[in-house]
Image (cartoon, helix red, strand yellow):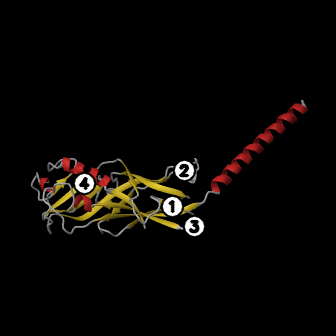
Amino acid sequence: MKTKKFMKTTLLLLFIFFISVSCSNGNSIVSAIAKGNVALKATATINNTGAKIGAASKTNTTTGTTISSFKINIKNIEFHKKENEDSNTVSSDSIYEDTKLMGPFELDLASGNTSIDVATVDIPDNVYDKVKFELHKSKDTTSTIFGKSIEIKGDINGNPFVFWTDAEEEMAVKFNISSNTPVRGIVVTGTQTNTTTINFNLTTIFGPTSTIDFSTAVDGNGDGVIEISPDNVDGNADLAKTIKDMLEQETDLEND
């Protein structure tokens, strides 16, 4: 009986020992992964010079469509690794999980081309070519965009307008192709701090080369403000969807 108890005790101690060693080794591997610091910024490219009122007209005017304010609320920001293309690319192992910044982050980009800080995060060394985030309807009752995920204000040919949406959906943003960037993405290494910027290009939506005809926007209820929104209060719901969809298409990443 003593021999059996001794054997059971010995086996139990050996089992605990191996479990301890395995966990210890696993933690050592994870903790040994080199990480680099990434500073995420955001900006809105707004060029109000030469804005136009109608898509059919090619004549730039000093009136037309101009932007004075742009606010957006986002959450769940993820950095996605570049897919393996050859054997020289870092292996896609489970230890390289995509990093998520929960948020929400309310971004006030009315200052035009000046970028603002969103967040700073440490992520494993690798090449990241995409950032995903979710449009998030603000639940902050003190916010000027409470109940909205995007709000843009300005004027159309001298008449004030506001575009807003309460859409909650994912946006996937990729790096802009540049001849000055040998790798389409951000190369994260533990030896340096990397900076990348989400650029919301409003010029392509509201500027002189826009394909949107803003002359169709109307002040349906006659309150003095052209409201372009999904609730169709002024009859501009279709235009609101077009602007939202185009904003998703015209947003990209840039390396600083």
Residue tagged by mark 4? Answer: 164
Categorize mark 1 by other alpha carbons within 10 Å: few (<14), some (14-19), many (20+).
some
Amino acid, disc 1: Val
Gap between marks 3 and 2, in whole Å?
24 Å
Q: Is residue 84 left or right of residue 10?
A: left
- Which circle, 1 or 4, is nearer the viewer? 1
**What SS does tag 4 mark?**
strand
- The reply to whether the C-beta atoms of the residues labelled 3 and 2 are less than 8 Å apart is no
Q: Which quarter of the rendered picture does the N terminus lie within? A: top right
| Label located before the other in sequence (3 or 4) | 4
- Which circle, 3 or 2, is nearer the viewer? 2
Residue 173 locus on image (x, y percent): 39, 54
Residue 191 locus on image (x, y percent): 57, 67
**What SS does tag 3 mark?**
loop
Amino acid, disc 4: Trp
Residue tagged by mark 3? Answer: 191
- Which circle, 2 or 1, is nearer the viewer? 2
| Label located before the other in sequence (2 or 1) | 2
- In terms of image quadrants, where is residue 212? bottom left
Relative depth, front residue between 174 and 220: 174
| Label located before the other in sequence (3 or 2) | 2
Residue tagged by mark 2? Answer: 86
| Residue drawn at x 63%, y 53% as measured from the top left | 30
